[in-house]
Image (cartoon, rainbow, N blue to C red):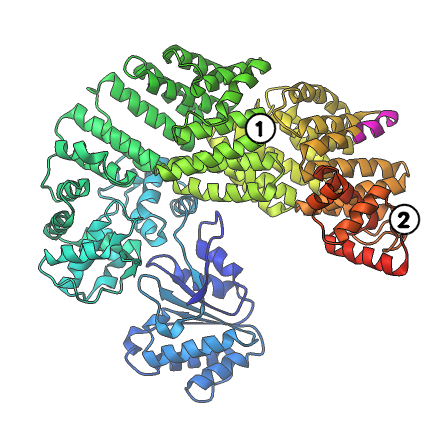
Amino acid sequence: MTAQTTATPGPAPHRANAAADRLDGGVHVVTGEPGCGRTRFLERAARAFAGPAVRVRADPARSAVPGGGLRTLLRALGDATGRTPAGGSGPALLDTLSAAPSPLLVCVDDAHLWDPVSRAVLGDAARQLCRTTTAARLLLTVPGHRPPAPEFAGLPVVRMDPLTPPEAAVLLDEVTGKALDGGVRDELVDAAEGNPALLLALVRRLSPAQLRGDRPPPRPLPGAEVLTGLAGGYLDGLAPGRRDLLLTAAAAARDDEDTGVGLGFVLRAVRHLGHDGAAPLPDLLAVADDEVRFHSELLRRTVYAAAPDERRRAAHLALARELEEGDPRALLHRAWAGAVRGDELEAVAGDLPSRRLRCAAYTRAAELCDDGPRRAERYTAAAGQALLDGRSHRALRLLDAARTGSAPAGLRGRAALLRGTTALRDGPVDEAQASLLLATSLLAAHSPADAATAALAACDAAWAAGDPAGCLAALERCGQVTEVPAPGDPRADYRLGLRALLEARFEEAAVRLRRVVPDPDGSGDPEDGLRAAAAALMLGDLAGARRAGARALAAARTLDTVAAVPRAREYLAYAELRAGRHALARTHAEEGLRAAHRAGQRNTAAHQHAVLALAASIEGETERVAGHVAAALGTARRHGLAQAATLAEWAAARADLGRGRPQEAADRLGPLVRPGTRRGHFALWMLAVPCYVEAAVSAGQPEGARTVVEDFARWAVFGADPQAPAQLLRCRALLAPQDRADTLYRRALDLHESAGGDFERARTELLYGKWLRRRRRLREARDRLGAALVGFERCGARAWAEQTRDELRAGGAAAGGPRPNGPADLAGLTPQQLRIARRVAEGATNREVALTLSVSTRTVDYHLRKVFATLGVRSRLELARLVEQAEKTGAHP
């Protein structure tokens, strides 16, 4: 099967609903592992279809009757259309579908269970429908735990991927009426791994007390009974040798299921169980590049959980025998078989190749330990590996297991550090701050470096909460527990620079923070890269922020530190957003959002939603803005994330402003930027000031904007935002008397030249053009508005571009088309603009033009925008045609 797409509709609880709504007709094969919701997909599609829908489910009793499935389908088609197909053959089916006079949906569930004759006819008919235009639509479902039937090869595929953690959480809230304890919900989401059927089976297993969190859920979660009840039927009829082969493959991937297992390794291990590994592999397994893995993770778990204990132990011992002497994985397999002491396993745990396996080794070593403090230490080490691996919920459960009153202060401090770090990414940030400050106190005497790490993380928590006093207090504690730093220590520079910034000692802050950005001590630690990216963003060094964010991302991948990936993407998205590269910001934020969901980092996901809302507010996607704003604020309000909330509110207001609704934008932004308890995050509210000033003036309420402009002026001096000086002059122009506004707008545009960024420059051009048009300076207004239109179109700001077209039409110009003086009239160009236009029309790049005319590329870009605006063209191709026409007709200077 080809042309595969994935059903990923966003935060909806039932992926099948949204995916079915998005199908654009034709033929689709719907596939996915057992329990993924294929049948629900067809039900939703049939309910939503605007016309008759025929649903047929394969009858296993008829699967041995040649043509039985086809005849069942033809009868159903006759009942739905009132036209009985002639005969019971393939041509009859194709004729019936091709001749459908009105929309007709045909749904065939479990098409793989049809008899071979019917499958062949159905597959041929589907391929014919793909090549013809017809009102009929055909949906087939087949399971994804085996290779697809050859009869359906080449058909477009819709794969039902697992639910994301937010989707799974919403589904649980729906089926339990939101009566489910938050911790229990997180554990169920973790255990189900996105499988809807398994998720529902788990929740049905819980008593009311367990749903409320008053009693612990049954262990293991899920157990063999639940897994077998859900997927055991797919394993019926397997011979003992094939069962052992599947079990060995499942055991080899235990706790590291994302990694393929060597096929030869598995086959050699199976021989130790008394079977010939040369037999054909079960079709539940996929082989690629000499690695084997299950088509379905649910079936891998079922195979392992349902096997008798003695066979599981035998499989692990067989795998251990095939590993080289000294390989720590051999010791881990023997530990799973119960043949190793915890001390031996703990000694090699750190040498295992992945964080998942290290977590598994420390966990197993803890289970094999009777000493309370030693057991707690091992569980804590396992939690640390789980947290770095992006499994927050797993880390918290391990920390719960590590609790003991007899643990020493240092161990309790490490546990508090891990718990606080987890809450910082996925919980109320005030709780994170308290836990991290406790960790600072407990670790101060035992590990000053870890204590300093905890204090800096407490500062991060206070920052996210919008608490500058809390940031300063945490930085003070960090200084108290930090040993005397070596000269040029970037971590000390970061701490001291951040403190100077919070205390408004801007010159010292700039000096300190600049030292952090270039290359943080070359350690390759993702945290150092993230710290450098944060410092660069505070300085307004957007290129430095991109470099540092990219270093952090690369280090996180190299060191298998999954938890750092979403935050690296977050900083990269912020850098691109502030640089005006909104498409790149959106790409980083979308990737970061997926990574945050996988890592269980809801707070980080809230920030990514805010970035996506800001990007969408540029592009004019109203529904997308509203969805991301709601997602960001939903988490921000529950967890006290003032930073994410400020960005989301700003995005919503900017979307209103782009749609020409200044009053709504001013109402939303006023509390965010004016002094008072409702003011936005202390480091971010000033970013929204230019939007507020524009909205307030456009709504006829300039009085409230004057005070915030002066606050904005003081902040702009620091240089943290390259756009701020030009934005400040734009704000002053909006509020200035008529005799000063003209000069202020021109000065703002001059500053935009050095700052770069199409969007902000285009906004200034638009506002200046509006101002000129209202004063009947129509030729000048058309020039400014034309340049604004080009800028908005270049950065994809559709709503703002439409505003600009409206202004052009109001001024008597044909928006986006030629000016009234004719398409070939070059007389309106200055001599320099004409020279540039002719060379560009000849195919020269901006750099080549600059070299020819001995000017900068920025000057060429500036004049070329003027040329586009004056001539009413929007591309180099249009310009070339216009110049060629002018040369032919002589309509040129």
Vertical relation: 265 (above or below) 411 = below
Does any portion of residue 479 appear in the rendered image?
yes
Kindly indicate whether the residue at mark 1 contacts the one at mark 2 (C-beta within 8 angstroms).
no
Residue 745 falls within the magenta-colored stretch = yes
- At 41% from the left and 23% from the top, the residue drawn is 457
Q: Horizontally, is 644 left or right of 747 in the view? A: left
Mark 1, residue position: 541
Q: Residue 696, position in %: x, y?
A: 74, 30
SS for callout 2: loop
- Residue numbers of the magenta segment: 738-746
Q: Residue 658, position in %: x, y?
A: 70, 41
Q: Residue 545, position in %: x, y?
A: 53, 31
Q: Amino acid at mark 1?
A: Asp
SS for callout 1: loop
Q: Examine the image and state in which quarter residue 114 appears.
A: bottom left
Give the class, few, some or many, for how many residues have Cα within 10 Å of label 1's Cα (few <14, many ≥20): many
Mark 2, residue position: 827
- At 39% from the left and 82% from the top, the residue drawn is 71
